[in-house]
Structure formats: C-alpha cells, structure tokens
Amino acid sequence: MGTGLDGCLEEMDRRGLLPADCLTVCCVGPVARGWADGGGCYDFQIVSATPFDAAGAHPLPVALDPPEVPCVVTQVTDRRWELTYWGAAQVRQVLAKVTWEQFERGGPAVAALTEAEELFLERMSAGRALSGTGWAEECRRQVAESAFRAIVTTRSLAAADSVIEDAVRRLAAQDVESAVLSARQALGHTVDALLESEGDFGPRVPRWRARRLRETRPAALPFAEYWAMETMRAFDPARPEAWVTAVLQRCRDLAFEVEIS
C-alpha cells in the first residue's frame, strides 16, 4: 500500500490491528497536523468499547484500570507505524482526572496523569479521525471543557518562573553562560504556556515550537518577535547580560498575558 492516510484503515484490518468493537481510529501527532515529511512516523490512537489484546504489543503503564495500554509498532512500506489501544473505560478515567473540581482542589493535579495519559489528551485534541468521527469529536469536546488546559498551562508557567529565578541568581553570581541557557529555557516554557492557554497542547517538543506558534498566532507574541529571541538575534557576546535581562523581562510580561481558563 501507499503511505497516504486513505489506505490506513484497510491496512490495519488486513493485519488484524482493528478491534471488532472499535469506537474510533485517530491519526495523531505531527502527521495529523499536516507536518508530515517523507519518512516520519504515523501515530494512531485507537479506542474500543473493551480492551483490545493486540498481538505483539508492548504495554504502556497507566494509573488506570486496567493498568496498561497496548502499543504496537510496525513497519508499513517505508513508514513506521505506532498504534496505541485504549479502552473506553480507561478514557473515562483519564477525563475524570482533569475535571475542574480536581483542578480547583489545588495541588499538582497534572501529577495524577501518567505520560501516556497526558499524551492521549494532548493528541486527541488535534487528532484526525479516520473512523468514529462523532466519538472523536465528543472526546475532543470533553477535553476542551475540562481543566486540562488550565493544568498544563499552570505547570508551564511554574516551570518558566523557576527558570527565570535561576537565571537571575546566575547573573548575580556572574555565571553568565548559565544565565543565558536558563533564559533560553524560560522562553521555551513561557511560549509553551502561551500556546497551551490558546488550546495548543503539542507536540511539546522544542523543534515544533516555532511551527505551533506560527499556526496558533497568539496576539501577545508575534512570530517575528519570538523568532528574533529564539535565534538570539539581538545577542551581543560583549554584553550577554543585556540579552538575558531583556528576555527574562519579556517572559514576565508574557506570563501576565496568559489566561488560566
């Protein structure tokens, strides 16, 4: 078969990778957002009414019942496919962890999510349904109305604040190189928070940050300004402190623009 998404369901069925009680198959990640390259991985989230026993799968641990989701990695012509299988009951349990009640209760609510659970919510928010469109849209609606956005945005803001404080301490200690690196980290966390507050949850990988920002276009940060900071265009090796101070102040200003809702 070719590598177009149009033939993916048929290929899954031919290989015995589709549950009989499948509720939805979603292509997720960069490919779903139209960022595919010639050899990138195809990622799929598959939800079925009951847990699916996928042959050759390796388990991903989750803090749910059942406590794992099967993941199958296979090669289809020149593409690597990764298929992750969720039961509907597991999805309900994940959504129950990100209610507004949980968020307002305080504490590190996101800590209740395992990496696989958080990735599921992140990816379903921007996934492309190949089947079960109605089910996928309802799941996307529930994620949008949950506190997931507030939880991850708050976490990124806290990370940015911590690194900003570190950069200030490094400057005071005349450890300029470390301060420069901390300022770059602070910029990344701050931009992540800004994007998450706009409902763009990922992929939360530095190499995709510019593309996410260009697509989301938050009013608080024009792309040209972000790119100038990201590429350190104004950095003067003779006066690194000035660049660090300017970037940290811009991060603080942007933090006030981020809405937690």
Image: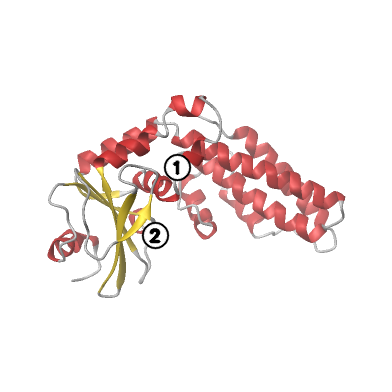
Residue 1 appears left or right of 185: left
Along the polypeptide, which appears first: circle 2 or circle 1? Answer: 2
**Residue located at (31% from left, 59% from top):** 71
Q: Residue 210 location in percent, x, y? A: 53, 55
Q: Nearer the viewer, mark 2 or mark 1?
A: 1
Residue 113 appears left or right of 232: left
Q: Residue 98 location in percent, x, y? A: 42, 33
Q: Residue 166 location in percent, x, y? A: 75, 48
Q: Nearer the viewer, residue 19 or 133?
A: 19
Quarter holding residue 9: bottom left
Q: Is residue 201 above or below residue 39?
A: above
Q: Nearer the viewer, residue 6 or 84?
A: 84
Residue 237 appears left or right of 56: right
Are there few (<14), some (14-19), or many (20+) residues within 10 Å of tag 1?
some
Secondary structure of the residue carrying tag 2 is: loop
Q: Is residue 258 visible?
A: yes
**Residue located at (47% from left, 39% from top):** 112
Mark carried by residue 20: none
Dot 1 corresponds to which residue? 113
Q: How many marks?
A: 2
Label 2, label 1: how far apart the Cα atoms are = 27 Å
Q: Is residue 111 above or below residue 210?
A: above
Dot 2 corresponds to which residue? 35
Residue 183 appears left or right of 203: right
